C-alpha cells in the first residue's frame, strides 16, 4: 500500500514524495499509538491500595530515554531518505511558496517526532482518568481532600507557622504563651501542598475550613469529615477513625490546640493509632486532577513547537546550502560565542565595561544580513555567504529578543538582571511573539533572501 | 522541405533499410515533438509490444502505422523560427589565487546549434561552461540570454550544466526521472509515459530499476541526458561527456546530442567540451579551441577558414627518413612523429589527393589517414 501511495505522490506531488511524508507519518502514527498504549497499559491505577508511583508516571526516566532514542533513530533514518533528492539544490523549478511549504512539512514531521513523549504522557493520563471518569466528581473529591488537610494534624510543626495570626487568637491565649512565637493550633497552620489545586473554586479552599473553625461551625466540619471517610470507603482504603472519634480529637474550640495526644497520621504507621489514608488519596487525586484540569498541555505543546521549530530551521538550512557550509556555520557560531565571551571578560577586567552576548549577536545578524543583501542586489558570487545565510536563518526566531536586548543596551539599561527580569515577566509573550515572528519571517526570508541567493554564482 | 520533413524522410529510409533501432529513436523523437499524451500512450504501447519477441514479425507494420500517424500530426504543427539563445561579449574570468585567466571570449549560440570546446586540460573549458551556466561570476564582460525568464533562479532552471563527474543519486533510475518530470510540472499518466519514452530514447529501458551504483559510466551519462531532456532546458552545457565512454557509446551519445539539439519543434543549444577532437568536430557547428584560456581560433566546421597549408595525420609502417624523402616531392614543410602517428605539413598548393596518389604510387603501407588542415587538432602540434 505504501508503495502505491509513494508512487502516487511521486507522480503528482514530488515534494511530498521526496519528504517521505507517507512512510514517516506511518511510522510516527505507529510510534504514537505504541507510546500511548505503553503509557496506558503500564500505568497501574486499578486500585488505590496498590497505587504508589505517584508523580513518577509523569517523569519516568526510562520511558523518556526510550523516547529520546526512538526520536534520534527515526530522525536520522528520515534525514537519510529525505536528503536523497534535493530539487532546490539542483535548480529544479521551486517557487518560494513551495519552499515555505517544504519547511512547514519539515516542521510538522519534527513536531510529530518530538511530541512522542507527550503522547506517552497522554496515555498515562488516559489510564488515570479511567479511575474516576466523571470530571465533576474529581473536582468534588479534590475539594474534600484539599479541605480535609486542615483537619489532619499529622505533625506538630506544621501547625507552628511563624506567621502567627493574632487576629484569630484571643489576647488571653497569647498572653498565656508570651514567649512562643507561634501557637500550635489548627488555625495556625502552614500547608505544603503545591499549587496543583490552586485553581479550585474559592469555596473549596482551606481558608473556608479555617472560617468554619473560627465560627465553630460544627455541622460543616462534621460533614467534611464524613464526606472524606466516604471517599476513603469508596476507594477501599483503611482508616482507624470514625467521624465522632475524629471530631473528638480535633474539634476543641475556640483555639483548636494541637498536642502530641491528638495528632492524626496521614498514612498508616506504627507510631500513631489514629490514622487516615490522606497521603494516598492526595497523591492519587493530584494525578487524576492534573489529567483533567492541568493547563500545562498548551505550554508543553508550545515548548515542543519551539524545539521543533529550531530543529526544522537547522534541517532546512542544510537543505538549501550544503553540509559543509552548515557545519562551518555551526562551528563559526560556537567559536564566535567563545571568543566574544573571552573578549568581554577581558574587557570587563581591564576597563570595567560590560559587553553582552545578545546585542553582539544582533550586531552579527545585522552585519550578515546587509552583506547577503548586498550580494543579491549586485548579483555577486556567494563568497562566504553560505555560512552567513545559515546563521541568519537560525537567528530568525530570536530576532525579537535580540531587538529588545539591543534596545536596552543602546538605552543604557542593559544588565543581565534587567533582561532576565524582563524575560521572566514576559516569558510566554516572548515565546508567542517569537513563534509568530518566525512563521512570518521564514516565509519572507525564503522569498527575498534564500531563493535569490541560491541563484548567485558559486565563485 | 522543412526540417521536420527532412527528418521524416530519414525515418522512412530507416524503415526501408530495416534499421529498426535507429527508427525507434526517431519515432520517439517525433512522439516527443507532438507533446500529446495520446501519442505518448501509443508509442509506449508500441515499445511494450516490441519488447515481446513474439511480436517481431508485425514490427514493420506497427512502425509504419505509427510513423504515418505522427506525420499527420506533426506536418500540421508550426515550426518556429530559430532564436538566438546566448551572446557572450569579452567574457573574462580570473581566479583570485591563480595565474590562470579565461578569455576574453566572444560567442553566440542559436537554437539547434552545437558548440564544441576543445583544448588541453587546464585551459579553461570547464571555466567557460561554468561561467555560461552562471556558476561562476565573470570578472569582466557580459553574458546575455535571449529566452524569457522570470528571475535569476528561473534562468538557472533553464540552463542545465552536466559536469564531468556527476553527483551520485539514490533510488532507482526510474524514480529519479519521474521525480524530475513531476518537479517540472509533468504529472500522472503523462509523467509515466514521458519518462518511459525518454528512457527508451536513451537506451535505458533494461536499466530502469537499477540504481546509481548499478550503472556503468556510459549509462550514467545517458541517465544525465535523460534527466536533462525532462528538464527541457534552453541551453545544455556539458563537460567531457565522452570521457569514459567506449567508441560506440561516444558515437551514440554524439548522435543523441545532434538529434536533441536539432529537434524541429523543441530545439536547444548545446555547448560541450571534449578531448575527442574529431568526434566533437563532426558533431559541432562551431568549435572553440582554448589555449591558456584564450580562444586560439574559432572555426566554423562547415565553412573553410583562410587556411592554406595541407596538414595530414597518418599512420604508416615506414621510417620517418623514407617518408621524408618521398613526401618532400609534394612540398613537405615538416613531418613529426608522435605516438606512432605522423603529422605532415605541406605547402598550400598540395591537395590530399596528391598525398594519397604518392602513397599509392610508392605502395606505402598506410593504415590510417586524416586531413586535419581545418581541424583544431593542428593546434596541438
Image: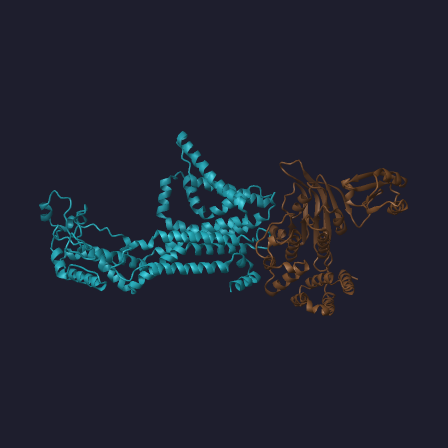
Chain colours: A cyan, B brown
Compare residues A155 and B14 and report the one nearer the observer.
B14
The answer to whether B172 appears left or right of B88 in the picture is: left
Q: Quadrant of the C terminus of chain A?
A: top right
Compare residues B340 and B3 and report the one nearer the observer.
B340
* Residue A277 in view here: yes
Image spot of residue B14 (x, y percent)? 77, 62
The answer to whether B1 appears left or right of A72 in the picture is: right
* Quadrant housing residue B126: top right
Q: Report the number of numbered marks.
A: 0
> Which residue is at a point 26% across and 64% down the rendered structure image?
A137
Image spot of residue A151 (x, y percent)? 17, 56
* Residue A308 in view here: no
The answer to whether B210 appears left or right of B22 in the picture is: left
Compare residues B365 and A97 and report the one nearer the observer.
B365
Image spot of residue B132 (x, y percent)? 67, 47
> Which residue is at a point 45% across and 46% down the rendered structure image?
A399
Residue at the outermost top position? A350
Image spot of residue A86 (x, y percent)? 56, 53
> Which residue is at a point 79% across and 62% down the rendered structure image?
B1
The answer to whether B300 appears left or right of A212 in the picture is: right
Amino acid at each position: 500500500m505504501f508503495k502505491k501511495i509513494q508512487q502516487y505522490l511521486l507522480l503528482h506531488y514530488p515534494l511530498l514524495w521526496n519528504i517521505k511524508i507517507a512512510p514517516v507519518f506511518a511510522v510516527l502514527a505507529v510510534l504514537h499509538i505504541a507510546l500511548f498504549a505503553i503509557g496506558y497499559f503500564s500505568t497501574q491505577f486499578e486500585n488505590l491500595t496498590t497505587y504508589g508511583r505517584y508523580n513518577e508516571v509523569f517523569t519516568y526516566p526510562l520511558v523518556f530515554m526510550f523516547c529520546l532514542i526512538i526520536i534520534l533513530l527515526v530522525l536520522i533514518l528520515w534525514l537519510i531518505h529525505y536528503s536523497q533528492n534535493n530539487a532546490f539544490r539542483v535548480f529544479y523549478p521551486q517557487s518560494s511558496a513551495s519552499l515555505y511549504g517544504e519547511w512547514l512539512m519539515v516542521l510538522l514531521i519534527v513536531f510529530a517526532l518530538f511530541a512522542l513523549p507527550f503522547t506517552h504522557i497522554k496515555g498515562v493520563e488516559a489510564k488515570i482518568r479511567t479511575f474516576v471518569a466523571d470530571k465533576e466528581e474529581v473536582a468534588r473529591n479534590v475539594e474534600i481532600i484539599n479541605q480535609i488537610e486542615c483537619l489532619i494534624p499529622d505533625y506538630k510543626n506544621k501547625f507552628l507557622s511563624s506567621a502567627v495570626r493574632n487576629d484569630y487568637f484571643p489576647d488571653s491565649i497569647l498572653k498565656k504563651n508570651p514567649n512562643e512565637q507561634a501557637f500550635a493550633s489548627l488555625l495556625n497552620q502552614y500547608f505544603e501542598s503545591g499549587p496543583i489545586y490552586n485553581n479550585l473554586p474559592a469555596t473549596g479552599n482551606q481558608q473556608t475550613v479555617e472560617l468554619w473553625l473560627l465560627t465553630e461551625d460544627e455541622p460543616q466540619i462534621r460533614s467534611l469529615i464524613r464526606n472524606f471517610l466516604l471517599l476513603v470507603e469508596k476507594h477501599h482504603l483503611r482508616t482507624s477513625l470514625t467521624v465522632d472519634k475524629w471530631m473528638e480529637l480535633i474539634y476543641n474550640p475556640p483555639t483548636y490546640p494541637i498536642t502530641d495526644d491528638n495528632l492524626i497520621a496521614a498514612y498508616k504507621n506504627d507510631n500513631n493509632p489514629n490514622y487516615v489514608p490522606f497521603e494516598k488519596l492526595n497523591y492519587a487525586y493530584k494525578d487524576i486532577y492534573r489529567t483533567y484540569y492541568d493547563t500545562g498541555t498548551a505550554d508543553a505543546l508550545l515548548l515542543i513547537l519551539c524545539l521543533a521549530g529550531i530543529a526544522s530551521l537547522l534541517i532546512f538550512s542544510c537543505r538549501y546550502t550544503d553540509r559543509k557550509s552548515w557545519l562551518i556555520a555551526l562551528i563559526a557560531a560556537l567559536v564566535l560565542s567563545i571568543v566574544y565571551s573571552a573578549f568581554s571578560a577581558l574587557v570587563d577586567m581591564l576597563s570595567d565595561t560590560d559587553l553582552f552576548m545578545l546585542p553582539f549577536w544582533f550586531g552579527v545578524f545585522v552585519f550578515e544580513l546587509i552583506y547577503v543583501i548586498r550580494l543579491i542586489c549586485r548579483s555577486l558570487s556567494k563568497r562566504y555567504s553560505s555560512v552567513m545565510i545559515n546563521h541568519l536563518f537560525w537567528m530568525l526566531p530570536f530576532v525579537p529578543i535580540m531587538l529588545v536586548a539591543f534596545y536596552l543596551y543602546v538605552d543604557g539599561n542593559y544588565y543581565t538582571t534587567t533582561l532576565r527580569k524582563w524575560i521572566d515577566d514576559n516569558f510566554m509573550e516572548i515565546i508567542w511573539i517569537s513563534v509568530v515572528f518566525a512563521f512570518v519571517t521564514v516565509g519572507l526570508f525564503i522569498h527575498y533572501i534564500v531563493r535569490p541567493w541560491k541563484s548567485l554564482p558559486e565563485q | 522541405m522543412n526540417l521536420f520533413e527532412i527528418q521524416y524522410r530519414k525515418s522512412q529510409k530507416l524503415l526501408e533499410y530495416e534499421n529498426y533501432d535507429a527508427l525507434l529513436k526517431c519515432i520517439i523523437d517525433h512522439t516527443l515533438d507532438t507533446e500529446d499524451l495520446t501519442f505518448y500512450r501509443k508509442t509506449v504501447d508500441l515499445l511494450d509490444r516490441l519488447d515481446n519477441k513474439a511480436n517481431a514479425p508485425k514490427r514493420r507494420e506497427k512502425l509504419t502505422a505509427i510513423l504515418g500517424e505522427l506525420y499527420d500530426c506533426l506536418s500540421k504543427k508550426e515550426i518556429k523560427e530559430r532564436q538566438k539563445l546566448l551572446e557572450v561579449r569579452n567574457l573574462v574570468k580570473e581566479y583570485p589565487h591563480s595565474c590562470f585567466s579565461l578569455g576574453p571570449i566572444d560567442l553566440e549560440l542559436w537554437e539547434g546549434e552545437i558548440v564544441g570546446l576543445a583544448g588541453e586540460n587546464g585551459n579553461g573549458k570547464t571555466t567557460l561552461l561554468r561561467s555560461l551556466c552562471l556558476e561562476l561570476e565573470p570578472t569582466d564582460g557580459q553574458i546575455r540570454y535571449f529566452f524569457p525568464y522570470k528571475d535569476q533562479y528561473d534562468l538557472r532552471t533553464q540552463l542545465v550544466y552536466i559536469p564531468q563527474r556527476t553527483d551520485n543519486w539514490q533510488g532507482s533510475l526510474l524514480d529519479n526521472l519521474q521525480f524530475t518530470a513531476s518537479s517540472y510540472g509533468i504529472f500522472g499518466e503523462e509523467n509515466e509515459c514521458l519518462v518511459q519514452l525518454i528512457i527508451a530514447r536513451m537506451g535505458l529501458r533494461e536499466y530502469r530499476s537499477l540504481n546509481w551504483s548499478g550503472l556503468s559510466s556510459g549509462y550514467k551519462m545517458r541517465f544525465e541526458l535523460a534527466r536533462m531532456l525532462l528538464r527541457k532546458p534552453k541551453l545544455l552545457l556539458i563537460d567531457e561527456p565522452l570521457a569514459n565512454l567506449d567508441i560506440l557509446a561516444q558515437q551514440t551519445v554524439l548522435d543523441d546530442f545532434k538529434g536533441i539539439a536539432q529537434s524541429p519543434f523543441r530545439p536547444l543549444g548545446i555547448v560541450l567540451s571534449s578531448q575527442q577532437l574529431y568526434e566533437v568536430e563532426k558533431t559541432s557547428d562551431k568549435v572553440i579551441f582554448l589555449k591558456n584560456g584564450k580562444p586560439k581560433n574559432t572555426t566554423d566546421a562547415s565553412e573553410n577558414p583562410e587556411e592554406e597549408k595541407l596538414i595530414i595525420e597518418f599512420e604508416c609502417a615506414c621510417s620517418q627518413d623514407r617518408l621524408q624523402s618521398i613526401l618532400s616531392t609534394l612540398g613537405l614543410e615538416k613531418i613529426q612523429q608522435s605516438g606512432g602517428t605522423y603529422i605532415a605539413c605541406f605547402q598550400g598548393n598540395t591537395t590530399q589527393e596528391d598525398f594519397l596518389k604518392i602513397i599509392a604510387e610508392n605502395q606505402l603501407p598506410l593504415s590510417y589517414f586524416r586531413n586535419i588542415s581545418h581541424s583544431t587538432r593542428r593546434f596541438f602540434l
